[in-house]
Amino acid sequence: MRSVPFLLLVAFSGSASAQEPRTFTGHNGWVGGVTFFPDGRTLATASADRTARLWDVASGKATAVLKGHTDIVAAIAVSPDGKQLATGSYDRTARLWDPETGEARQVLRGHRGAVLAVAFSHDSRILATGGFDGIIRLWDPIYGREVGALHGHKSWVNGLAFAPDGETLASASSDNTVRLWDVPNRKEKAVLNPNAAELRCVAISPDGTLVAAGTRYGLVKVWDIMGRQEQVTLYGHAGEVWSIAFSGDSATLASSDGEWQQPGAVRLWDVETWKERAVLKTT
């Protein structure tokens, strides 16, 4: 079971600067996913307590508790248009929610194991899900219909990220690979292998030029999407890298580590120089 403390997860909202931390209290289990709504005013979280929650960033108060999953909620994503929220759970389903009402719109069934990753395309018209069964499933989020499946991974799919063009999807897996997929044609474009390291998370820069992934052994790997060449390996994390995100201007990469019941850290990296800008430590 994945054990990810709340404070070790990263998401960007407008600015890449390190500010005083704010604590959001309310979940009764570890938090496996965090994401901001496009306006930066609402934060969404997914937890082992079987719920997802929406928070007002300014006040730090919960505005909604989303109930319905029957097991750990491991992943969460907000559509770029801000009108849809998706969650993935150990109960083998993904769910689509109305952020305004907190009600479930669709229950997506098809995976044969826990759903560990969810991601929307940049036009909000496709939802990708992945998990224990190693299959990436593509859904029409409006009607809740499966519209395709991507086969190739030999183990869990832990992370998913769409490129800005809406046609490329990156996936990170425990089979030690990041794979790039041609979504319209449902085909594999490339396999990126970071020298036999299990991949825990993946992100694509908003400018569409880079893909970054975090490994089980505390490394961050970065590749050039066009050339599919490794650009850099970033060192410094003391534990598994569970979460990764680029800032909106693609100038900063954030990565977070953590081991169960041990303090972790978020590291901010300058994408131009690949030097470490800051370390945000938990207590």
Image: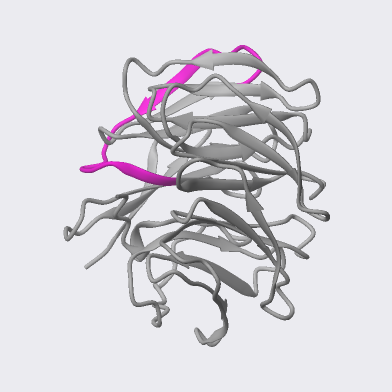
Image colouring: one colour
Relative side of 165 to 53, left or right: right
What is the x, y in percent for residue 71? 42, 63
The correct choice, above or below, for 282 with respect to 10 in the image is below
Relative side of 108 to 269, left or right: right
Foreground of the two, 278 or 153: 153
* Residues in magenta, as a range: 225-243
Give the mark count.
Answer: 0
The correct choice, above or below, for 165 with respect to 140 in the image is above
Relative side of 109 to 148, left or right: left
Q: Residue at x 66, y 65 (%)?
A: 37
What is the x, y in percent for residue 113? 46, 43
Q: Can the viewer see residue 42 in this picture?
A: yes
Residue 272 highlighted magenta (yes or no):
no
Residue 235 highlighted magenta (yes or no):
yes
Q: Residue at x 42, y 33 (%)?
A: 156
Outermost left residue: 262
- Quadrant position of residue 76: bottom right
The correct choice, above or below, for 57 with respect to 61 in the image is above
What is the x, y in percent for residue 91? 47, 56
Which quarter of the rendered picture does the C terminus lie within? Answer: bottom left
Foreground of the two, 142 or 237: 142
Relative side of 58 to 186, left or right: left
Q: Residue at x 55, y 42 (%)?
A: 111
Foreground of the two, 107 or 99: 107
Q: Residue at x 47, y 34 (%)?
A: 133
Q: Can the viewer see residue 273 in this picture?
A: no
